[in-house]
Every structure is written in C-alpha cells, then in structure tokens.
Amino acid sequence: MPPPSRVFPRGQVMNLTDSTRAIEALRTAVDTGDAAEIAHATMMNVWPLYSVHSEELVAAVESLPSAVLEQYPVLRILHRMTPVLARTRRPFKPLVYPEDARNMSADELDILTLVQMVAFRLSGDVAAAMIYARRLQDRIVQIRVESRERPDGPLWFYHQQIGSTLLAAGGVRRRAGGIHHSARSRPVLAATRRREDGTRAHGPRPRRARIAR
C-alpha cells in the first residue's frame, strides 16, 4: 500500500495550546458539512481537541468518509474502529513521503511519529513501533519545542506512549517477583509514571486513554 498523499496542510501552523480556538474551528467546519473542511480543522487543532474536547473530536473523525481518513493517518487512528481492525484483518501501518516529512514543522513531526508508533504497536508490529519510539525519544531530547513542553502540551503523552511501547517490547521484565527495567527504558518509564500520577490527581477524562490501547 502506498504512503498517504497528505498528512498536514502545508503553509499553516498547528494550534497546540488554545482549546477555545480549536473547538470553535471544529464546530465551524462541522456546520459546513464539508469533509475536507472538517479534516483540515481537526488536523490543525488535534492536540487541544484531544485533550479537552475528545467527544466532539471523535464524532467529527467518525463522520469523515473512508477516502478522507485514508489520507490522514493522524485522524484515522482516532477512529474507534481502527484499533479493532488493526488487531484483526486490517493492520494500520502509516508511512509518509519523504517530501512531506521535510515540509513538516517540529510539532507536526512529533505527532506523526507518535501516531506511527502507536499504529504499528496496535497492528502487532512491536519491532517497528520501537523504531518510532526511539525516534520520538530522540526528538524530545535533541529538538526543543516550546509548545511541546508547556504544562498543557503533549510532552507527557509522548512519554506515556513511548513507555507503553517499551513495555510491549519487553522493556520491563519480571524476575524473582520483582520488576527490572532496561537502562534505555528506565528514564522514560519514570517520566511516564510521574506524569500519570499528576494526571490522575487532576481526574482525567477516561476517553483520552483510547489511543493508548
């Protein structure tokens, strides 16, 4: 299957921090009834929508025709049927043209790498998921992005999903009744636990964990 022809709209900046602007853009697009407009608004505001308005986000994604979803792997992974199909008869392994990747911002590449990691993991290809987990981990360490590291930014979620992938790949071993972590996985898993503890203390919305399964 060829890589998708479209990932993020070119020449525009993603909104990662303003949930009010995000939901207004989504509702305006939904009111038009135009699938392309809905996909565009969702893509450009995906993190604040996922964080604060997940029910409307999922409803918008599930209203899109399959032909549109095929072009947007970031949206497709939010569809409730994607994990089910990925585990059975239709693995979801999104790729991207190198030209598209070169034209993406740091935020866009972060999110695409996250989606690739989760998609390959859901499809049972943990070895490939580990490649994307390491790639995202390296990006976090080597490329500093202000929007990623804000308190309302997606950094904690990146750590959580990297940790989940390491666990799936055997980064954690049970031995003699205890749990032992590999040297590479230990810092990421520790960061994951710290963030999860803080999130639980603030009472997260349960639907937000869907992508993690």
Image: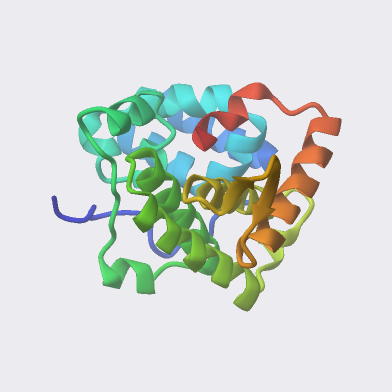
Task: Relative to 42, say whether 133 is above or below.
Answer: below
- Please, which residue is most extreme toward the bottom here? 142
User: Which residue is pictured at 40% across the width and 34% down the height?
Assistant: 38
- Res 95 → quadrant: bottom left
Please tell me which residue lies in front, 130 or 207.
Answer: 130
Q: Position of residue 82 (x, y in %)?
A: 34, 30
- Please, which residue is most extreme toward the left here? 1
Q: Position of residue 182 (x, y in %)?
A: 61, 61
User: Which residue is pictured at 69% across the width and 25% down the height?
Assistant: 205
Q: Is residue 22 left or right of residue 119?
A: right
- Please, which residue is most extreme toward the right here? 201
Task: Relative to 112, say whether 20 is above or below.
Answer: above
Is residue 5 visible in the rendered structure shown here?
A: yes
Is residue 17 visible in the rendered structure shown here?
A: no
Q: Position of residue 62 (x, y in %)?
A: 38, 24
Q: Position of residue 84 (x, y in %)?
A: 34, 25
User: Which residue is pictured at 29% across the width and 37% down the height?
Assistant: 69
- Res 64 → quadrant: top left
Q: Is residue 18 left or right of residue 203?
A: left
Specify the color scheme.
rainbow
Q: Is residue 125 left or right of residue 195?
A: left
User: Which residue is pictured at 75% across the width and 40% down the height?
Assistant: 196
Numbered marks: total: 0
Q: Is residue 22 left or right of residue 91?
A: right
